[in-house]
Image (tube, rainbow, N blue to C red):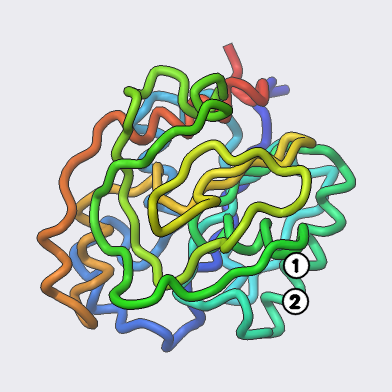
Amino acid sequence: MSDRKRVYFISQMAEPGRIDPAVYADAPGGEDEVHWFSLMLDRVGVLDRIDFRGCHVTRGDSLPEFDDVDGVFLGGSYHMVDEDLPWQRNLQAWLTAYRETAKPLMGICGGHQQMATILGANVGPLGGDPMAASLPVDVTDDGRDHFLFDGLNGQPYFHFGNFEHVKAAPEGARVLAVRPEMPAMALDYGGNWVSVQFHPEADHEIFACSWRGSHPEYMKNYKPLPEAPLMLVNFLTAMELLAD
């Protein structure tokens, strides 16, 4: 029997019809975020060290049974957290119950907002234009000593693509990174839960494509960030999810 841990990527990217599939026509696998995530894990050399699985909750896929999971990544979304869609309510209920297992979870962008929301934070608009670029983040004192930022430089860059943000960290969470517009952009909630507003998993070319239909002028704002996906490895390593 394989000793690899079962690691899920939960995609909440978009309901059918929310985005034009032509936007991602040139992306590997089309608009399949689970596939993109697997490609990034392969690129950083860890895909063959886990039992990788995925589901698309916006397409009606069932969320995994807790006994079938060792760790989870929760992806971003074209949907706002307050849309109160049926799949969002289902996901929030699942996350609330999953929290009780103490099993690892890393949220990304919309996943960050979902996690912070169910733990008591408020999400609101940034104001003005969306944040749409590869940008540096300011790592806090807590962040400098945190496993997520191991091996990254003192002011690492990540890809952003968001209209909203977590307005303040929920009670008990540690703030690991900030920007002037965002006082709670990377959080450790305890209990093996962490989340980030930015996208350490993103390929810059695929991410630029996300703006092709709505704001093509933003596409030039993204650049290769080869060190950023190290954060995924750091999470998997710290949570003991990688096979030898």
Q: Is residue 132 above or below residue 49?
A: below
Q: Nearer the viewer, residue 9 or 219?
A: 219
Q: Position of residue 169 (x, y in %)?
A: 65, 52
Residue drawn at the location 32% of the way across and 77% of the way down = 128
Count of numbered circles in the view? 2
Cα–Cα span, label 2 and label 1:
5 Å
Query: Which disc, if any, is residue 192?
Result: none
**Is the Cβ of the residue at disc 2 closer than 8 Å to that at disc 1?**
yes
Q: Residue at x 77, y 58 (%)?
A: 119
Residue farthest to the front, as pictured: 180
Q: Is residue 15 left or right of residue 193?
A: left
Rate crowding at label 2 as few (under 14), some (14 to 19) or many (20 or more) other CA atoms within 10 Å: some
Looking at this view, name the residue that lies furthest to the top: 244
Residue type at mark 2 is Arg
Q: Which numbered dot is residue 92?
A: 1
What residue is pinned by disc 2?
89
